[in-house]
Each structure stands twice: as C-alpha cells, then as structure tokens.
C-alpha cells in the first residue's frame, strides 16, 4: 500500500513507491482528495493535491488510478459552471450546501439526463478518431456533434436507433483491425494537459469581431489568434473580458475565472443567464461554459483550471465551432505554479517563478489556432488571457513572457482607468500583429476605407502624443492653430471613438459598419476644419461652433439601427464651419 | 484519540519540532503544557514522516526541550459560537478576555472556513448608505462587498472606519438586523480603545464582537485573529441571518506576522520577503464576504491596511487590490490640507457599485454623474501638473476653470467632516459642482441628463462664483 509520508500544504510525499506514473491522477487519504503525481525519484514520489489537506495524516492511503487528470467531455457542458477540476458547482451546491467540502464527489456531467440523439452512421461505416457519428441539440443554440474518441478506429458493427439515451449508454460498437470491439458513448475523457490533435493548421484571416471600437479598429484579434490584456487592479480587465465574452462573434465562449473573486463569478453567471445574445435572441449562457476557481479555492486546482478550460474549448472546436476562451487571470495561474514550485523547493528563476514558466505559457497559448479538424470542419480556438502584473509593472516575468507568445497586446492603463476612460487600452503601448493578415477581410467585408481611416487615426494619435510633450512644458495656448486642431481632433478620437460606454444600450456593442462611419465622420471634420484654418480663421471660432462636441456624442446620438443619420452630420459640419466669418 | 508527547526535538523561532509522532493530522490543533503548568496553543504546519513542525501562537518564550507536554487534539482549530458572543471581547485566538466567563457554545466551526460555492452566492446589489459623499457618490459600498481602506500611518483611517460604522444605514426592511465584528491585529491599545469607545457612544456595543490581538500580544496569534473574526461573522450571517460588517485593522501587521512565520519555517521568500502564497492566504480571508442564497444575512468587510511608505505598489496593497472589490485610498496630500475624509477619489474604486446604483437603488443620474465627476476631476489633475510648470496665471481660461472646479470639489464634496450626508444631497451637490464648468465640457454625459441636472446659475450662487477671480475673468472674456 502507498502511504502518505510527509505533508506540506498542497504537496505530499509518498516513500518507497514505484508504481506511480508522472501526471497520473491519484486519490489521497480517507477523504479521497484528488491529486496528481508531479515528480518521482527512487526515494519518494511527490503529489500535488487539488483540495485542502487539513486533517490529512501520514500513513493514509494513496490510490493510483492509472490515468491522467482528464476532462470529461460530452453534452451538458454548455450552460454549466465548473470548478478548476471540472466539478459541477450546481450539483455540489445541491449536495453539500453553500460551502465546497474537500473530497466531494459528484460526476462532472449529469449522467441521468436523457438526450435526443440523431445518429449519423450505419453498420459497416469505417470510423476513426474525431469523426462525427451523431448529433444532439445540446442547447437551443448549439448542436453537439458527437465525436469518435481517441484510439478508436474501425468499422461500425452496431448502432442504436435514433432516440433518447443517457450519456453513458453505448451508442456504437466499433471493431478494429485486431478484432477488438470498442464501445462508444456520448462521453469521452481527454487528458487536460495534452492538446487535442488536428488535421491541419490554417492561416488566420478572419477577425474575431467584438463590437469594441478600440479593439476592432486599432488592435484586432484574429479568429484562432491569441491576445493578452495586462493591467493593474482596477483598470478594467475583468470588465473587458466580460464585454468580449458577451459580444464577440464566436459560437462558443469558455470563460475561466482563475483566482477570481467569488462575487464576480456569481455576477458573470447571473449576467450571462439573463443577457440575450443579439444574434440569436437566446440567453448567452446557452453558448457558454464557465469555469470558476475563486482565489480562495485550493491553489493546485487553480493551476488546472486553465487546462480544463482549453481542453473543453478544443473539444467544441473539433465539432467545427469557433470558440473564444477568456482566461482571467493568467497571473494567478502563474502564481499557482510559483507557489507549488516553492513548496517543491525547486530552484527559482526570475522573481521566484520557476524556470519553466515561459514554456508553460507558450504551451497554453499555442493551443489557440484556426484549424481543419478530423471531422473535416473548420474551427478555431482564440485565447484572450488577462494578466495582473505586480504593481502594474509590465516588465515583470508573466507579462514579458506572455508578450513573446501572443500577437495582440492590449495594455490597460491606470491613468485612463482613473479618468474612467474605458476600455482603458493605452493606444501607445498596445499592438496587434494580426492587422496584415486581416487586411484582406477588412477591405472586402467592411470597405476599403476602413484600414486607411485606421491608419490616419493612428497617425493623429501619435502626433498628439508628440505634441503633449510640448504642452506639458509650456501649455496649449502657445501652439499654432493647426496643431491645436490636431489636439482637438485627437480628443474627439479619444473621447468620441476610443472611449466606449459598456452600460449604454447602443454603445456597448458597435457594428463595424458604424465604426467605419464614425471614423469617416471624424476624419471629415478634421479635413473641413483644417481647410478653414488654412484660410486663416481662428481656431477658437471653430471651437465655438460646438461641432467637436456634437461629433463626440455621435456614439450616443445615432442608434445602431439608424445609420442614415450620419448624412445629416456632414451637412451640419459644412453649415457650421461655412458660417464662420 | 488524544495523543500526548513529552519533550521536543528542536525550537526555532515560533516553531517547535517533534520527533517520533504518529497519527497526527495536518493543521491539527495542539495544546502545549509548559513546565510551570501554563498552557499554550499551536498548530501542526508540516509533517515529514514522524517529524512534525508545530507553530506556537503565543510564542516559544520559556519553552524547553524537556518536560514540555504536547497534546494533540485530533481536530483543526475550532471556534465555539453562539448568539451570545455579541457584546463580548475575545483575544486573538478566540478566548474571552472580558471577565464575563466562557460563552455558551451552540456550535463549533473550523476557523479556516471552506470556500463558498460561487453558485450559492447571491450577487450583491444593495448599497449601504455611509453618509460620506466620496464613498456613497463615487465608491459606493455594497452589502456583501469587501472594500478595504488603503491608508498610511498618521492618516485618519480609524476615524473613517468608525464614521462608516456609525452612519452605515442599510436600506430596506432588515436594517435593524445589523452587527459588527471587529478584529484588531497589531494595533495599539489606544486604537482598540478608540474603537470600543466609539462603539459605546454609538450605542451599538451590544451588537459588537471584538477579537483583539494588540501590538504587545503574541505576534503569531495574529494569524488566527482574522480567521476567528470571520468565522464568527459567517456564523452570525449565515445561521442567524444578520447583516455583519467586519472591520479588520491592520492587515499589514497580519502580513508581517505571516512573513515571520514563513521565514522561521525556512520557506523560499517572494517579493520583499513575503511568502509566495501571500496572495492565496489573503484571499482565504478576504473572500469570506458575501451573501448566500440560503440565508438573509450578509458579510461585508472593511479591512484597513497601512501602506508602508504610502506605496500602493507594495506587495500588500497590490495583492489586496487584486482580491478585493475595489479600494478606498486615503491621500496624504489631502490630509495635509486639512481635508477630512482625505479620500483620493481617482485611485478609489468600488467594483460592485455599477449594479447597486441608479434608478431603483439610488437615483437614475448616479452613474452618469459619477463618470463625469471622475472625468472632470482627472482633467483638474492635468491642469494642476501644467500649472506646476508654467504657473497658474499662464493657464488657458478653460484650465483655470478646471482649477477652480477642483478646488470647489475638494472643499465641498470630498471635505465634509463628521457630517452625515444623505445620498440625494450628495448627488445634487455633485451636479452643482459640475455646473461650475461650461456645459460643453461635460462630454461624458448624454444631453437629456444634462438638460435635467445642469444648472450653471445655481452653481454660480451656491459657490459664490461672483466673488471668484477666475470665473470673473472668464465672464469678462466672454463679453
């Protein structure tokens, strides 16, 4: 029997054991706490325990299972909320009450629920990994395509008729080359730290449209891409992740609250249940999987939550869906790595983080991609990871290492957040490398003017940045009129365009068409004003027309469903500036 | 099974080590009987085969390797609770120190608590009216929230906490069902007395439970003090349906105790010597706030922490800010100007307020007012930094106007003394102040709200702008 020898927080050691495998799932002690083997040497085996070890005694038994920590994949994931090791929180609440008790044991998915299955194969069909063999209407929004689990290929020798089945009932039998017979149910397990295989990686060419102007216009992310959102506390990371989860045009959202606040997770859950997806008129929760590992839940489960989430995302991708995964926050995950590494007494690298931090970050973000799946469909996983840098200092290891592996970087700024300029994305520090890959799409789908207008915006903002250096020293009044105009237009862009009100019914989500019209209007304002100034008229006269304020408020004054109103503004500008004597 | 052992292997700082122990559990409580018969308490913090490390809460002074008797209790530390704890005073590990004898115990609870299932929580939405403009108006406190006060030595955080406790009015029918749990960690006797006196003056002493670990009490006990307090709070809220406000001061002293414990255990230190698990440890305390579906009570936390050297990027405020739902930051500059409460409104934030304000809670104009005040006040900061370079006289008229707005805002809105101000007065005052600025400058607000609340004339008279030099100049320029 394997016995617990030493206990130090979530890390326990077992002496003189030789039947463990690395990354194997184990049950520890009388309470059957879930654990994972993380290192083995000839003397002892180290296990990290995913639950609180209070009360555990040396000498209690450690049971091997022979399998890795795996996600349980099948219908019933959508609309559900899990903890970091995929225990269903609704079911736990029903069983245990308001607190989560160590060793609680509830099946990940509801195994009693019956699903209406439409089987797509017949006896004799050859099947292999990843092929679709049946379809279930999982929620009113999403069809769950049942996939052949791994290590199974061969001919179908038995198939059930269409009808209602429980998840664990055998639907198919497949005979492989060696005449072994495999039974297939709706449920399959997948080790969370192993990426699900794909047929082909495709290049990224379609943006993940979120209706957030600063992102869609200045720093877009591609479907299948990855982005990082670093920001100190209070800069609106969570808010931004929520906005993205609510409005982006992915089919499925996987939202991971990793070391998050409990109240915030409850809010996410309530909000997503109430909010109606504008495209389908169904509650958002029907396309969402939530993973909540709040900051006071055991630290090892926090580490696992990221992998659990990405495995579920990949599973839906393999059915041919576009999945957006939000991880809030990856810093908490990195800190969980650090905490466990410290307990293992490993040699620390930068700031106490383990030396393998960069490779772990890379492994995570590399699970994003736009792919052709084994079911011969197109699907994608896009990853948006929030980072909470210590002291809001972007030079710390998690931010720096993440920067190396993501191609869009949305730096949140304290100053902007203090002024309640949301989304507080600093346009001077942020970037997106996807813009080149996406240019074709923008030109074709939104219009050729979009990227040009974007470039002009960037130029104006850069010029403002330069001019502000001077203004900070000598004040705005001494600048010549044309430079004053640049500052004013930059203000219009900042306040009227980049700043977006998540609580306003029209402003919370802005379609690309309106974004383009807004940009064109602002640039028209700039052109006309410039001409007026070149004619030698004073800048203050332009300000008095109040046109700048009018254009700033366009985001509120023109509803998303009546974009024709833009035409009136062109005339208003002409009239107002034309009247200047 | 109660095991007893005699003699220790090693003593190191607050830790004692025992050899050849069997059948003990991780984080189990122990009683330590000294040679002279006195009893101390400890907890198993590490087990390595038959070697156990035990943390002694009262310190290891006078302990010797021989003749010390260690008794294992077989269970983690539990706190005996009943409704009778209200009005009582306990030490840092939950023993009564008010000479009123032991408490009748209805239930024993593990002080470490268990994580609340997010599904069982109710999202907090009811605001607590503190009567302080800069809190009610700009960083609204919500029932079930954890909102720390970031302060520094010498600033009036205790006064502010007391004022909040005194003035805190719950909205709704169950306003009377309100109690306070107070945890002092490493604060001086004076501070503890100040709180006790203030509770007395407010006539709430019968509704207060105090857990005191003062600066001259054993340091390691501090690790248990907030846990005892929160266990009591959870018990009263979730089993007796009370609304509990937990005031904990000073969290910095708690973190220092944790650092001392960690270093004597020989752990690898993280930032500034604090252990790598400081975040998880703080979270295990601060997350114990909220409202659950099965009870009508709530736990609201106001932890107070003094920022070493007023540095908000120090690990303690930094990590706390990532766990709590916002923060109230006190600023020394305001304090020096005699402004009370010296709340720095720009870095202060309440994350839960967005759903607890507006129509049906406070007033429909609350959200736009707040956004506009933040935006305009941050413009004041720009103007001030410019003025510090080129002098105030050289500023543009618009910037001068902002300077004036900033002064009035600080004088009338932030500075309010110990007055209890109604939420309606706070909101009206806010609009009056914004009306000092030209209407076009209020670019965060929708026209129809401005039409209803913007009134320059009123502001002109309320703040006697006709006596004001800058505004006069501005008026002249207009003509």
Image (tube, coloured by chain):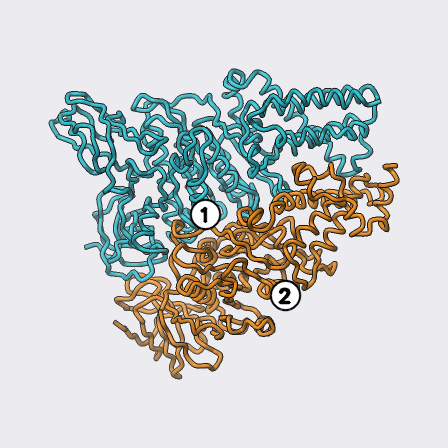
Chain colours: A cyan, B orange
Q: Chain of mark 2?
A: B
Q: Circle 2 sits on which residue?
A: B159
Q: Secondary structure at mark 1?
A: strand
Which is more foreground, mark 1 or mark 2?
Answer: 2
Q: Is residue A354 visible?
A: no
Q: Chain of mark 1?
A: A
Q: How many marks?
A: 2
* Residue appearing at x 27%, y 61% in the figure: A58
* Residue appearing at x 78%, y 27% in the figure: A542
Which of B292/B103 is in front?
Answer: B292
Image position of B225 (left or right of B250): left
Image-quadrant location for residue A545: top right
Gap between marks 1 and 2 measured at Cα: 31 Å
Q: Are marks 1 and 2 on the same chain?
A: no
Image position of A139 (left or right of A171): right
* Residue appearing at x 54%, y 19% in the figure: A446
Residue B441 lies, in percent from the top left, at: 73, 38
Which of B311/B408 is in front?
Answer: B408
A95 w.r.t. A376: above or below: below
Which of B282/B182 is in front?
Answer: B182
Q: Circle 1 sits on which residue?
A: A260
Neighbours of disc 2 within 10 Å: few (<14), some (14-19), many (20+): some
């Amino acid at each position: 029997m394997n016995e617990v020898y030493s206990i130090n927080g979530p890390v326990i050691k077992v002496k003189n054991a030789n039947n463990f495998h690395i990354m194997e799932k184990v049950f520890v002690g009388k309470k059957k706490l879930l654990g994972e083997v993380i290192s083995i040497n000839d003397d002892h085996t180290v296990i990290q325990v995913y639950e609180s070890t209070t009360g555990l005694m040396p000498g209690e038994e450690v049971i091997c299972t022979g399998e890795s920590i795996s996600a349980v994949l099948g219908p019933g994931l959508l609309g559900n909320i899990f903890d970091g090791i995929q225990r269903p929180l609704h079911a736990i609440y029903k069983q245990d009450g308001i607190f989560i008790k160590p060793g609680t044991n509830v099946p990940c998915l509801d195994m009693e629920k019956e699903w209406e299955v439409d089987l797509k194969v017949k006896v004799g069909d050859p099947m292999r990994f990843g092929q679709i063999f049946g379809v279930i209407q999982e929620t009113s929004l999403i069809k769950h395509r049942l996939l052949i689990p791994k290590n199974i290929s061969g001919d179908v020798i038995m198939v059930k008729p269409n009808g209602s089945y429980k998840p664990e009932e055998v639907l198919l039998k497949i005979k492989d080359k060696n005449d072994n017979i495999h039974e297939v149910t709706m449920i399959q397990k997948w080790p969370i730290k192993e990426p699900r295989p794909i047929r082909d990686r495709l290049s990224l060419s379609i943006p993940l449209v979120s209706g957030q102007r600063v992102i869609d216009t200045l720093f877009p992310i591609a479907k299948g891409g990855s982005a990082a959102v670093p920001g100190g506390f209070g800069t609106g990371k969570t808010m931004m992740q929520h906005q993205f989860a609510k409005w982006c045009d992915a089919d499925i959202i996987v939202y991971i609250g990793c070391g998050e606040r409990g109240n915030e997770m409850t809010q996410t859950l309530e909000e997503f249940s109430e909010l109606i997806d504008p495209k389908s008129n169904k509650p958002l929760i029907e396309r969402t999987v939530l993973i909540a590992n709040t900051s006071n839940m055991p630290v090892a489960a926090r580490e696992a939550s990221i992998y659990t989430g990405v495995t579920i995302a990949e599973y839906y991708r393999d059915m041919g869906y576009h999945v957006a995964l939000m991880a809030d926050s990856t810093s908490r995950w990195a800190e969980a790595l650090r905490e466990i590494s410290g307990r293992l007494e490993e040699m620390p690298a930068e700031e106490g983080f383990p030396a393998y931090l960069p490779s772990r970050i890379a492994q995570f973000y590399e699970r994003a991609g736009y792919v052709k799946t084994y079911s011969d469909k197109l699907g994608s996983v896009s990853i948006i990871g929030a980072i909470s840098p210590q002291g809001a200092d972007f030079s710390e290891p998690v931010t720096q290492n993440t920067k190396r592996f993501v191609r869009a970087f949305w730096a949140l700024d304290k100053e902007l957040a203090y002024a309640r300029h949301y989304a507080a994305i600093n346009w001077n520090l942020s970037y997106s490398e996807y813009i080149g890959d996406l240019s074709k799409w923008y030109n074709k789908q939104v219009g050729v003017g979009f990227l040009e207008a974007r470039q002009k915006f960037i130029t104006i903002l850069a010029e403002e940045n330069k001019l502000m250096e001077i203004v900070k020293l000598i004040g705005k009044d001494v600048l010549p009129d044309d430079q004053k105009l640049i500052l004013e237009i930059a203000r219009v862009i900042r306040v009227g365009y980049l700043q977006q009100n998540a609580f306003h019914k029209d402003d919370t989500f802005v379609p690309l068409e309106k974004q383009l019209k807004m940009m064109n209007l602002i640039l028209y304002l700039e052109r006309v004003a410039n001409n007026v100034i070149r004619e030698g008229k004073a800048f203050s006269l332009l300000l008095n027309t109040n046109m700048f304020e009018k254009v700033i408020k366009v985001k509120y004054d023109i509803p998303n469903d009546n974009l024709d109103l833009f035409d009136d503004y062109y005339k208003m500008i002409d009239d107002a500036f034309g009247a200047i004597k | 099974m109660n095991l007893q052992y005699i003699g220790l292997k090693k003593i190191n700082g607050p830790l004692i080590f025992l050899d050849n122990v069997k059948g003990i559990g991780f984080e189990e409580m122990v009683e330590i009987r000294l040679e002279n018969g006195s009893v101390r308490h400890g907890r198993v913090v590490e087990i390595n085969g038959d070697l156990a490390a035990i943390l002694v809460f009262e310190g290891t002074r006078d302990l010797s390797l021989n003749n010390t008797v260690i008794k294992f209790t077989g269970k983690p530390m539990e706190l005996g609770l009943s409704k009778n704890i209200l009005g009582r005073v306990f030490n840092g590990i939950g023993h009564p120190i008010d000479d009123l004898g032991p408490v009748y115990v209805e239930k024993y609870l593990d002080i470490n608590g268990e994580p609340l299932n997010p599904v069982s929580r109710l999202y907090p939405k009811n605001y607590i009216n503190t009567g302080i403009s800069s809190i009610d108006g700009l960083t609204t406190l919500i029932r079930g929230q954890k909102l720390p006060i970031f302060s520094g030595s010498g600033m009036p955080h205790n006064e502010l906490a007391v004022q909040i406790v005194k003035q805190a009015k719950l909205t709704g029918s169950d306003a009377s069902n309100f109690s306070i749990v107070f945890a002092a960690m490493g604060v001086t006797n004076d501070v503890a007395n100040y709180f006790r006196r203030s509770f007395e003056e407010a006539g709430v002493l019968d509704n207060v439970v105090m857990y005191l670990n003062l600066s001259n009490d054993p340091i390691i006990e501090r690790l248990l003090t907030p846990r005892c307090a929160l266990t009591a709070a959870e018990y009263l809220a979730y089993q007796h349906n009370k609304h509990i406000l937990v005031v904990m001061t000073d969290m910095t002293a708690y973190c220092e105790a944790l650092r001392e414990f960690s270093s004597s255990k020989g752990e690898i230190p993280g930032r500034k010597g604090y252990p790598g698990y400081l975040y998880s440890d703080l979270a295990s305390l601060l997350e114990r706030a909220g409202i659950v579906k099965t009870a009508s009570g709530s736990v609201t936390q106001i932890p107070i922490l003094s920022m070493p050297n007023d540095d908000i990027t120090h690990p303690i405020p930094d990590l706390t800010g990532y766990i709590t739902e916002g923060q109230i930051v006190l600023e020394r500059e305001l304090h020096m100007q005699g402004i009370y409460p010296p709340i720095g409104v720009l870095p202060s934030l309440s994350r839960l307020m967005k759903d607890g304000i507006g129509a049906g809670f406070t007033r429909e104009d609350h959200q736009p007012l707040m956004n506009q005040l933040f935006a305009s006040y941050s413009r004041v900061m720009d103007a001030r930094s410019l003025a510090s370079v080129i002098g105030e006289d050289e500023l543009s008229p618009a910037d001068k106007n902002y300077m004036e707005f900033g002064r009035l805002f600080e004088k009338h809105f932030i500075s309010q003394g110990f007055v209890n101000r109604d939420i309606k007065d706070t909101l009206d005052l806010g609009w009056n102040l914004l009306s000092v600025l030209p209407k076009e400058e209020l670019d965060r607000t929708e026209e129809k709200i401005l039409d209803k609340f913007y009134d320059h004339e009123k502001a002109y008279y309320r703040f006697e702008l006709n006596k004001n030099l800058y505004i006069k100049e501005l008026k002249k320029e207009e003509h």
